[in-house]
Image (cartoon, rainbow, N blue to C red):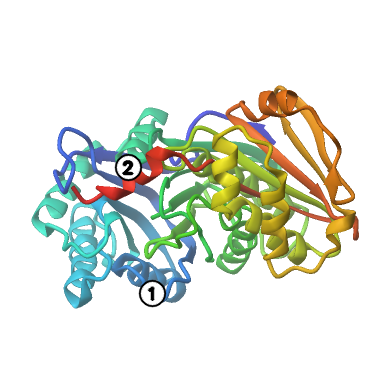
Amino acid sequence: MEIIKGGVTAAKGFRAASTAAGIKYQGRTDMAMIYAENPCKAAGTFTTNVVKAAPVKWDQEIVYHHPAAQAIVCNSGIANACTGEEGYGYCRETAKAAAEVLHVPEDSVLVASTGVIGMQLPIEKLAAGVKQMAPKLDGSLEAGNLAAKAIMTTDTVEKEAAVQVEIGGKTVTVGGMCKGSGMIHPNMCTMLSFVTTDVNISKELLQEALSESVKDTYNMVSVDGDTSTNDTVLLLAGGMAGNPEITEKNEDYEKFCQALNYVNTTLAKKIAGDGEGATALFEVKIIGAESKEQAVTLSKSVVSSSLTKAAIYGHDANWGRILCAMGYSGAKFDPEKVDLYFESRAGKIKIMENGVSTGYSEEEATKILSENEVTAIADVKMGDASATAWGCDLTYDYVKINADYRS
């Protein structure tokens, strides 16, 4: 597998465009379009929040009940959530506008929105934005990068990833872009991820590959414990790589899954590291677990703990908070057998052994925790299973950003 530059336009047959439609933001782009030259197999995973945004419902219908998809239209600024029949109608009108200018079926256009909940979309601006983007569709990496910037809300940086792998004697590319900074606690399966690939694969296996990948990537991220109404991951496969169609779980399928998992892991970590107000990516590894389920439960409990996140912000090796978060997770373990380490580019230190402090150097621990990527490793000594979760520190700026988000 080779890591390459790019995002949604890295794979053969995909183009992208962006525009400033003035939906909520002024002086910046706020709409993006992804277009596939050929009809694509489509897969998706969506929020498990009972309150689902209109675009989620629209996309679920297309992904689950229609044979192909060929375009994605996304706006930032307004989430089109809690907007009733009117909001769902705007999904249809957006898809209709795109279908007319792209000359594709209306039911092959996926839509996505992110931003403030409860506001209705200015559909005239949205439709105008669609018309502005169609002539600008381009397959360059720059066009893909501009599209990634257009879907940002409180994100501070665009998020892209791409890799290539050889399958069936052909070069297959997987690339993607995502957005997400706050209201991040995906359980699928205000994060959105769009992944494109030129692999030739059956729709059934494409969906299975995505559903499995999401478990260890986006679903292992938490910024603030809030599962959005709009969480969506869409995967389009155009088949232009020319490999023999993957119709069974063989070596080719495994290679594709590895490439997909790399892209999704990279994007998930970028979301965690760009959490609202964050100064550090916080990674939690549980090792020596009895089962994968136990490891997942423990790691997500720690990475979601507000007290632990605040300690990471303060570069404070407050290991009691980590053990406490593990204790209320619901997973069974013996706290008197747990070893705990902190690690970063500045080094690695053993903080706790068999449930008690090692008498470590606070100065050395603070130095390790002062890096912008910090890892906590907990060994529960029960088996061979492991899991990794990603989050960020909790800062003053998180409150500031969310206190006046609508204004």
Res 227 seen here: yes
Q: Position of residue 375 (x, y in %)?
A: 69, 38
Q: Is residue 321 above or below residue 80?
A: above
Q: Give the SS element for disc 2.
A: helix
Q: CA distance from mark 2 to mark 1?
A: 37 Å
**Disc 1 packing (10 Å; few <14; some 14–19; many ≥20):** few
Instruction: Between residue 300 and residue 319, name the one nearer to us.
Output: 319
Please state if 287 lies on the left or on the right of 87 as rendered: right
Q: Position of residue 332 (x, y in %)?
A: 80, 69
Closer-to-camera residue (130/203)? 130
Identify which residue is drawn at 42% across, 65% down. Answer: 68
Q: Which residue is mark 1?
A: 61
Q: Quadrant of the N terminus?
A: top right
In this rendering, which labeled residue sits more in front, label 2 or label 1? 2
Residue 152 in sight here: no
| Residue at the image point whose x is 33% and y is 33% from the top | 146
Q: Which residue is mark 2?
A: 400
Total numbered labels placed on residues in the image? 2
Locate residue 148 relative to residue 209 in the image: left or right.
left
Asked if the residue at tag 1 contacts the one at tag 2, i.e. Cβ–Cβ closer than 8 Å, the answer is no
Q: Residue at x 71, y 23 (%)?
A: 363
Q: Position of residue 354 (x, y in %)?
A: 90, 50
Q: Amino acid at mark 1?
A: Glu
Q: Name which quarter of the figure residue 398 lies in.
A: top left
Q: Position of residue 78 (x, y in %)?
A: 23, 55
Mark 2, other Cα within 10 Å: few <14 / some 14–19 / many ≥20 = few
| Most foreground residue, 143 or 229 | 229
Q: Earlier in the sequence, mark 2 or mark 1?
A: 1
Q: Amino acid at mark 2?
A: Lys
